Every structure is written in structure tokens, then in C-alpha cells.
Image (spheres, helix red, strand yellow):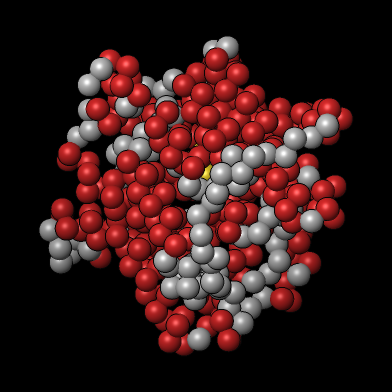
Amino acid sequence: MTNAAQRLIPIWLRQYPLSALLTDLVAGLVVGVLVIPQSLGYAVLAGLPPVYGLYAAIVPVMVYAWIGSSNVQAVGPVAITAIMTASALHAYADQGAEQYVLMASLLALMVGALLWIAGWLKLGWIMQFISRGVSAGFISGAAVLIFVSQLKYLTDIPVAGNSLVGYVSSMVKYAQQLHPLTLLIGVAAFSLLVANRYASQWVWRSWLSVSYAKWAERLFPLILLISALLLSSILHWSSAGVATIGAIPQGLPSFTLPYIPDLREALNLLPTAGLMALIVFVSSSSVASNYARLRGETFDANRELTGLGLANLAGGFFQSFAVAGGFSRTAINADSGAKTPLASLVTVIVMIAALIAFGTALAPLPYAI
């Protein structure tokens, strides 16, 4: 193999440890299945048809896994980019779904181009001015917002907003719409997941060896999800008012040329694209650098800019909207045992399988899970 060809292969793949293969496969499978409803929901939040959430979790994820700086960061659609996409493109909502989708992809291209240019100019030094305390605060604040924003799936109360006060206010306002069965399913699943994480030494390790107990802990979310699918099908939870994913349209994202706007439209979108690029970089770098410190790995901010930029650029040609490193999906990826970006490539395979073959099989999955 020539030196040029070798440089196209990422270092993690050239030096891949076979001991990590099984844990990467499990982590990718767990993340892939668990973030399907999340991806669908973020597409809706962006004003797009739900299936575009899965589109955004295929090509951008593959590109970042190949080029990005983090071994465990899981890139994909996230709440903040979805909200900003909807805010920036609300004027196009009346022009038809096709036009809106093209504009969302154009916005992803603009964000990607700005990030790539910043990486080319080696502007990653900006992260040096963001202290560990600020980074930790950003992660903690985002975790609280994500937790509160997900309450709408646990309660069926239409929680909405872009701040903690907004979420709590809307929850109090619409509290009468609480759905008891949805709450029961959500609380039961949440309790089991918490018990699996914090009480596993008394549950699994009381009757399994240490190595088998670790695998039981990692596979438990997947077991819980499959069990919920079966119970939902048998007990017809959707007929009882429980919100479920529903059938996912089949077919992979296709190569699509972006909408070419006139100069005025491009200038109107540029400030939003610039702000989104900054937020994507800061949030993704906060997560990636935090996990790099925890795992004793190096973090290259310039490479992160390039990876995020090319991920969004490529996604813009394959029906994606702007993506970033996800707080919750990265946590799931790391907690499930991911060691290298191979886990993200396995997640892509799960997304492709969902779009081709398993769209109907996943239909009964409650959003509360």
C-alpha cells in the first residue's frame, strides 16, 4: 500500500486493537437502536419530516468517524442545531416541504464550510480560552436541559421551550394532559436503567461472574428496548394512547444538490450559520475534550473543526441538516463500552437497517422508552 493510500486510513483503524472489537460492536448496536426515536424527534424539532433525523445520522457520522478527533464522540442531530434550523428557516415553511428540506441542507453546508475553513486556518486555539470549569458547566447545563426536554416523552405533556424556565412553565401550563400509562412506562424504564447503572454490583454480580456482569450491564438497555417492543405489540399500547414511533419510511438518503440561493438569501442565513458553527464547535469540543481527559487520550481542536466541518459538508449533499457531537448519545456510547470510532460505524449500519428493513418492526416502540 502506498504512503498516500495509508494516509487515507485513519490511525485508529491502522492500529485497531482486536480486543476492542466486541465492545465496539455492542456499543454501536445499543446507541444505534436507542437514538432512533431521538433522531426522529430532532428532525421534527427542526421542522422536517421525521425520517430526516435518520438521514442526518448516516453520512455525517461516517465522515466524522473517519476524520474526527474523538474516539467515542457520537455525532448526529442534536436539539440546539434542530431548534436553530427551525428558527432560521421559518420563513420557508410556507413554500413547501421540498423547498424547506433543501434550505435545511443548504444551512448544513454553510455551517460545514465555516467549520472547515476555521480548521484550515487552525482556529482551534479558541478552545484554549474556554476553561475546564466553563466546559464542565456547559456540559452540566446541557444535561439538565436535555433531561427536562425529554419529560414530554415520559409524561405526554407537550413540554416546549429553549430554556429551563420555558420548559418548566410549559409543563405546569399543560399538566392536565398527563397520560398515566405513558408515565408508568417511562418511570419503570427509567428506574430499571438507573438500577442497572448504580446497583449492578448487587443485581448482576450477585449471580454472575465479573466479566459476564459487565456484559449484562451493557446489554441491558438493548434488552429493555426489545422487551418494550414486544410488550407494546402484545398489549397494543398505541391503542391505549401511548405515543409510539410508527412506521419509518423505507429508503436511504440520496445525493441531492443543494438549493442555490440568491445573494440576499445567503447573506440572511450567514449570521445564523456562523452562530451555529460556533455552537457546534464549542459544544462538540466540550464533550470530546472531556472524554479525552477521562480516558487519557489526546484532543486536537483543529482536527475537531475539520471533522465537524466535513461531516456537515458531506451531510448537506445527502439530505441532512446540521449535526454536532451529542451529549446524551456520546454518554450512551461511552457507557456501553465504545473504544474506537468503529462503534459509530456500527451505529450507521443500524440506521441503514432501520431505513431498509426494520421500519415496521420498530413502529410499536414507545417514545417514553
Q: Position of residue 118 (x, y in %)?
A: 60, 18
Instruction: Identify whether 116 is placed above or below 342.
Output: above
Q: Position of residue 365 (x, y in %)?
A: 48, 72
Task: Name the foreground residue: 262 vs 47.
Answer: 262
Q: Residue at x 37, y 71 (%)?
A: 226
Q: Position of residue 66 (x, y in %)?
A: 39, 32
How many numbered marks appear?
Answer: 0
| Quarter location, residue 222 | bottom left
User: Which residue of the protein is positioned furthest toward the left in this rendering?
Assistant: 209
Q: Residue at x 29, y 53 (%)?
A: 26
Instruction: Identify whether 295 is placed above or below 198.
Output: above
The answer to whether residue 122 of the structure is visible from this angle is yes
Task: Name the foreground residue: 342 vs 152.
Answer: 342
Quadrant housing the N terminus: top left
Q: Residue at x 15, y 53 (%)?
A: 211
Instruction: Identify whether 209 is placed above or below 83.
Output: below
Q: Classify residue 78 as left or right of residue 216.
A: right
Q: Classify residue 74 as left or right of residue 313.
A: left
Q: Position of residue 311 (x, y in %)?
A: 52, 34
The answer to whether residue 183 of the structure is visible from this angle is no
| Quarter location, residue 193 | bottom left
Q: Residue at x 45, y 83 (%)?
A: 233
Q: Classify residue 263 as left or right of residue 59.
A: right
